[in-house]
Image (spheres, grey):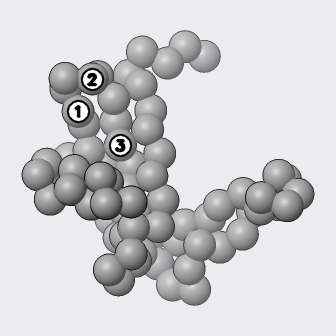
Amino acid sequence: IFRVHIIAIMEQPIFSTRAHVFQIDPATKRNWLPASKHAVTVSFFYDASRSVYRIISVGGTKVGAQHITSSHTHS
């Protein structure tokens, strides 16, 4: 979590918005659970050195989720 917070400070997001964030229920691996009761700030970052996009949600002072997507992902 600390590493993600440093990335967010050093890099400027390419896009930010407020959204409702969900996570997969670890018990069932099928159901979606809300990560918070209200919409949180979600920011999109691009790391050119690794060619990856980072999607980070922050609720209050807590980093809630991180997703890393390669720009070379094949369908």
How busy is the neighbourhood of tag 1: few (under 14 within 10 Å), some, or many (20 plus)? few
Q: Earlier in the sequence, mark 3 or mark 1?
A: 1
Label 3 packing within 10 angstroms: few (<14), some (14-19), many (20+): some
Instruction: Tell me whether circle 2 and circle 1 mark residues in contact (CB < 8 Å).
Output: yes
Q: Are marks 3 and 1 in contact (CB under 8 Å)?
A: yes
Residue under label 2: 50
Describe the element under mark 2 as helix, strand or loop: loop
The residue type indicated by label 2 comes to Arg
Q: Which residue is drawn at 72% across and 57% down?
A: 24
Please provide percent x and percent y for residue 65: 48, 59
Q: Nearer the viewer, residue 3 or 35?
A: 3
User: Viewed as shown, does residue 24 lie left or right of 54?
Assistant: right
What residue would you read off at disc 1?
47
Total count of labels: 3
Q: Name the residue under label 3.
A: 54
Q: Where is residue 18 in the image (x, y as percent from the top left)?
A: 38, 71
Query: Which of these two is toward me, 42 or 62?
Result: 62
Query: At which x and y percent is residue 7?
Result: 22, 50
**SS at mark 3 in the image:** strand
- 66 shown above or below 41: above
Q: In which quarter of the image is the N terminus?
A: bottom left
Q: Where is residue 4 in the image (x, y as percent from the top left)?
A: 31, 54
Q: Give the amino acid type for the residue marked by disc 1 in the picture.
A: Asp
Q: Residue 18 carries which label?
A: none
Q: Is residue 5 above or below residue 60?
A: above
Alpha-carbon distance for marks 2 and 1?
A: 6 Å
Query: Which element carries disc 1, helix, strand or loop?
Result: strand
